[in-house]
Image (cartoon, rainbow, N blue to C red):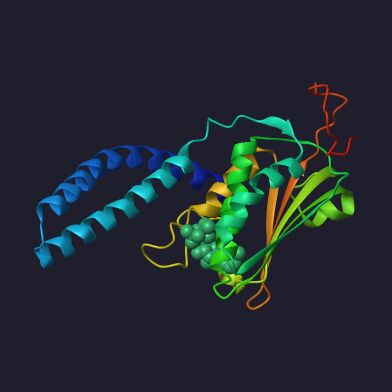
């Protein structure tokens, strides 16, 4: 618990810092990127000037990508939770996910038709799936399989004893599993830390899973990871199923893709 508290505090501080820095930094980058663009136009055929201006532009574009991730990470008030069926969110993100992971990775989905509804921001939850899919793809450079599964489970006292921060109850469990490289115990222990990355400079930001963690926590959920080197990685997200008896639910649902209570 102490550990979790420190993690939450760190996330909060990093979020505030990131938001402020990213905003100012972005203004500076506009100047850098604009000027390198003009330099490139003026450079004509001078090879060394072109190469250098090109390098500036490339670095500037990468930096701009980083600041937009930082801004997304620190934006914490924009969650617009709705009561949705997890299967619908998975299905709606499916095309995008398939494109993200490329042709060498096969996307397999297995959706539990009995799954209950949850309260999440569907856009943010799509972001969660995309961040997990990008990491899965990076862990499978020579191809593999990405499985997204939804399941309706009831956790009793015995189950929740091993997951100290989960209360007994009914959950929609969304599992994202890959057949990739897997992780060492040391990496696994740090994956949700902001700025923790093993991907090297210019490639990873270490914010993907910190963002995932933040969104899941803000949705009153829980996330855990199973991984071993050579055995692939499985992320499991637990979202409390909304008791529809106590919450107003939009009527006139034409298709019933989500199980009730
Ligand atoms: P980034 O992708 O920018 O490195 P993340 O927060 O998304 O940042 O991930 C942090 C680190 O966790 C990655 O650098 C990688 O070492 C590890 N990781 C995350 N997902 C996976 C996965 N599916 N398989 C293996 N390693 C992973």
| Ligand 1 quarter of the rendering | bottom right
Regarding residue 5, the answer to whether it shows in the image is no
User: Where does residue 36 sit, x and y in percent of width and height?
Assistant: 18, 51
Identify the residue at horizontal 58%, vertical 49% (top origin).
Answer: 212
Please state the total of marks drawn on the protein image. 0
* In the image, residue 162 above or below residue 245: below
Q: Residue furthest bottom?
A: 230
Residue 41 is left or right of residue 159, and the answer is: left
Q: Nearer the viewer, residue 40 or 33?
A: 40
Q: Is residue 224 left or right of residue 183?
A: right
**Residue 261, horizontal then vertical, whole percent:** 91, 35
Q: Which one is nearer the viewer's eye here, 87 or 222?
A: 87
Please name the residue shown 39% across and 41% down the image: 17
| Residue ID at (60%, 63%) | 136
Image coordinates of residue 163 in percent, x first then y, are 76, 54
Up/down of 241 relative to 37, above or below: above
> Is 26 on the left-hand or right-hand side of 167?
left
- Residue 92: percent from left, percent from top: 67, 43
For the question of whether residue 203 can be seen, the reply is: yes
Residue 233 located left or right of residue 167: left
Q: Quadrant of residue 236?
A: bottom right
Decide which of 196, 162 is in the foreground and name it: 196
Name the foreground residue: 172 vs 14: 172
Image quadrant of residue 86?
A: top right
Q: Residue 200's quadrant in the figure?
A: bottom left
């Amino acid at each position: 618990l102490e550990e979790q508290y420190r993690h939450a505090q760190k996330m909060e501080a990093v979020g505030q810092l990131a938001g402020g820095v990213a905003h100012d930094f972005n203004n500076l980058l506009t100047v850098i990127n604009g000027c390198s663009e003009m330099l490139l136009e003026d450079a004509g055929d001078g090879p060394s000037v072109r190469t250098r201006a090109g390098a500036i532009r490339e670095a500037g574009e990468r930096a701009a990508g980083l600041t937009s991730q930082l801004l997304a990470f620190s934006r914490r008030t924009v969650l617009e939770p709705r009561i949705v069926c997890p299967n619908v969110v998975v299905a709606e993100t499916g095309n995008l996910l398939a494109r993200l992971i490329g042709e060498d990775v096969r996307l397999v989905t297995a959706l539990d038709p009995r799954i209950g509804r949850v309260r999440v921001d569907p856009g943010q939850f799509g972001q969660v799936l995309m961040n997990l899919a990008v990491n899965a793809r990076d862990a499978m450079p020579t191809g593999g399989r990405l499985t997204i599964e939804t399941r309706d489970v009831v956790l009793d006292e015995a189950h929740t004893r091993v997951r100290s921060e989960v209360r007994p109850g009914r959950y929609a469990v969304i599992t994202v599993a890959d057949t990739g490289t897997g992780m060492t115990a040391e990496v696994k222990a740090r994956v949700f830390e902001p700025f923790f990355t093993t991907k090297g400079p210019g490639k990873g930001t270490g914010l993907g899973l910190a963002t995932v963690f933040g969104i899941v926590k803000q949705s009153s959920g829980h996330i855990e990871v199973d991984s071993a080197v050579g055995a692939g990685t499985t992320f499991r997200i637990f979202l409390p199923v909304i008791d529809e008896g106590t919450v107003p639910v939009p009527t006139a649902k034409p298709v019933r893709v989500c199980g009730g209570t």
